Image (spheres, helix red, strand yellow):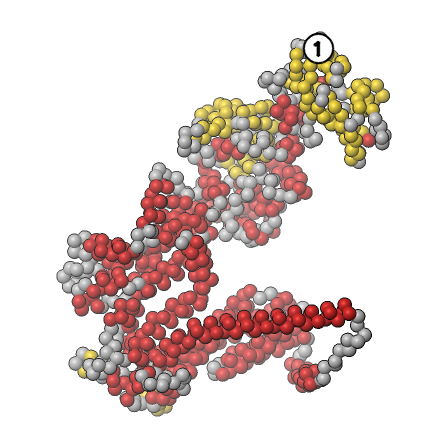
Amino acid sequence: MELRLENLTKIFTNKTGAETTAVSELDIVIESGTLVGLLGPSGCGKSTTLFMIAGLEKPTGGKIFFGDDDVTKLAPEKRGIGLVFQNYALYPHMTVYNNILFPLENLDVPRTEAIQRVKEMANLVGIGELLDRKPSQLSGGQQQRVAIARALVKKPRVLLLDEPLSNLDARLRLQMREEIKRIQRETGITTIFVTHDQEEAMSISDKMVVLDFGIEQQYASPQSMYNNPDNIFVAKFLGNPPINTFEAEVKKGHLMINEHKFMKFDVPDGLYDVGMRPENFRATEEGFKIAIKDIFHIGRDTMIHFDFNGSNIRALVDSDNIEKGQKFVHLTIKSERVYIFDKKTGEVVNHG
Amino acid sequence: MDKKLFKKSNKIEKITFIFDFIAIAIYISLFLILFGMLELPEIVDGSMNLDILQFMEPTYYFLNATLDKLEMNTIISLVILFTLVSLPLLLINIKKVRTRTIYEIDSYTASSKFVQAVINLLSLNVVSAGLRIYNMFVLVKFVKGYSAKEFFKSIFPAVKAYFKKIFKKKKVEDLGDLDEYSVSIKQSIRRQNTSFIIRILFTYLFLITVAIVIIVPFYWMVLTSLKDFSGATLANPKLYISISQMNWVNYKVVLTALEFGLYIKNTVIVALFSTGGTIITTVLAAYAFARIEFKGREVLFSILIMTMMIPGELYIITNFITVSKNGFGWVGMATGENNYFIAMIIPFVTSISYIFFLRQSFKQIPESLYKAARVDGCSDFKFLTRVMVPIASPTIFTITILNVFSSWNAYIWPRIITGVGGQEGQKYWLISNALRDTAFVQDNGRVMYNLQIAASALVTVPLLVVFFLFRKYIMNGIGRSGTKG
């Protein structure tokens, strides 16, 4: 089922009357059966957006459509959503079985069918043997699975996940990431996944939304967002190690770095912010000669530090091309991997 | 590790419980029968002459035997003693069987079974004793692998070896070979051990002293309540009495002739209803203040909290006007039109401090549970009953117990209410009023101290039992309410 947000806005007013805009005029269409990652730094309004979709928060303005139905004013239980919380929110005094059964009790599903659905769902998420345990007797990953099973057992139209992996350790996080992807594929349910971890979002999502201060920055598939960021915020937010940014001037169509002509660009002359990802540099025989400040060999790759217009720049190059004690190196970079951003608006000017 | 033997042992234990239970039922019914047979002085002119109680020499006929007063006292004392020993034994064993795992069984478990069998034998419960001995052999086989025959054979050599070890002279350690460092370490270890033993010794000495200070008044109460009048008023009172001297008839006098049975019934009724009402109102109010958002919630809550600063005694006059003729008219009306119970219960069916107490524990339940329940289509009331109350059940249990305590001990309000209407009000006395106002004084000016003490023992003992059973929850409640000042 398609999910559509139209001009969705949420403004919190505190006691003194000061207003905080958590979400500002969000316009997104989420296609049926896709997994969309809602990504942004903490406090950017991603959880608020999720709770508005769930119906737990009332939007200040705008509309939410599930398919063709306007659900903006519908109570949460009537929307047909499954919600998984950051801390799982399992009922601590109930067994796993009762936890998963609880939503069905409220829907007045016949007993035999309910039991069958609980068992089916428990097997789908892989906790079939743990049904008579209490949540406190489960590991974090198992609790997570129970929470997902509880959200899915109602056969919801939309599954909402609120930072579901942030309470798990690194290895389990990787495993659960794949697990969630698998469950989503098997059930084919439209899913929204909130996270602040860009790597997590990129690996799991079909499409991603990046938010900053409640404003949508870009809505695209992970790879195209990585390769073609719309603005400097998205470029900086994605990627590890982060993108290098520095100020540079374009003179007569040439990007000037360290008072040399670096590359030709079809942009108006002026001062710009320039971004280059560390892994896009290549060490070659010819190319731009730079003086190495520092070298870190980290196995397969080597990290080189050098200066561009006074800013420290990192480049990740193949270890084979760099020798120990090397003072200078020639680097090249493809012109479509150089991002030139407008100084005022932060919009990219040489792409799209 | 033979699982079969472990299961067998548990099975035997469960069968033993049945016989234990039967024995306890027999003790209790025996006690009730004998207690019912106890003879009281005759009622003359509507009142009982309690002075002759200790000089009466009744004879009782029970199961074709003739029993005099002393024999009767002995039998009742023994039956009570047996119950007091068997009941905790049964409860502890039930708890143990339910919780113990196969790894916790050792030879001490087997030997404790032996001790329990001896106790059973002393309390004339031969079947349980036999079963426990059998269970001991099963456990010995489980732990050591001995059969019963081998076990008996192994006792004598083991005892012999033990005594040999005790009487063997300790070898004097030769420190000459060791270097200075090892000697100093040896000395410091010895010093440490000595100080540890001294510390333990003083700690327990202190604890025992304090325990005696606390226990002696209770012991004295029970002791005096069982003495006859002249025994209780001796200038040099005895510190103990033999079981044939225990006058259980004192309790019968208090319960029937002095009508403490009625007063206890009144108290139980008031305690049950006011506690039930308090729990219902407290849970609902605490939930509203903790979870439901409505206008003026904080203001209303702070007004309620403010009322906690006004001492309860100040409400008495206004409350009295409310329940009396000028208000609802529950008391102070013509004879037969008064509702003493309602007047005693209704003003106490809610408690601000418990609402505050429960609201705090409701607040600790994460908000996300509420959100999850909302998404799952759970109504507020269902969320309260299915999620909040079970999670906060320890707190609610604590509130229940504390409230039962306070209504059991309530004095001023019941005294005022039952003071209205003379003779009619007297029928609605609660135990605390009765303890204060019952005439333990005889016509000749004697105060029947032994009966008065028996009455107070009757009032105190149920509370003590409740305290020992639920002390964890009570301490929990007092500890937390301590933080609010």
Residue under the point 65% across and 69% down: B192
Q: State the image coordinates of residue B124 (x, y, percent, origin top left).
A: 47, 83
Judge from the rendering whether residue A345 lies leftward or rightward of residue B335; answer left or right: right
Q: Chain of mark 1?
A: A
- Image quadrant for the C terminus of chain B? bottom left
Q: Is residue A321 visible?
A: no
Q: Residue furthest front?
A: B180
Judge from the rendering whether residue B144 lies leftward or rightward of residue A91; answer left or right: right
Instruction: Look at label 1 and name its amino acid.
Output: Lys
Q: Is residue B40 above or below residue B290?
A: below
Q: Which residue is mark 1?
A: A251
Residue under the point 45% across and 52% down: B392
Closer to us: B58 or A293? A293
- Image quadrant for the N terminus of chain B? bottom right
Residue under the point 58% across and 66% down: B100
Q: State the image coordinates of residue A192 (x, y, percent, origin top left).
A: 56, 32
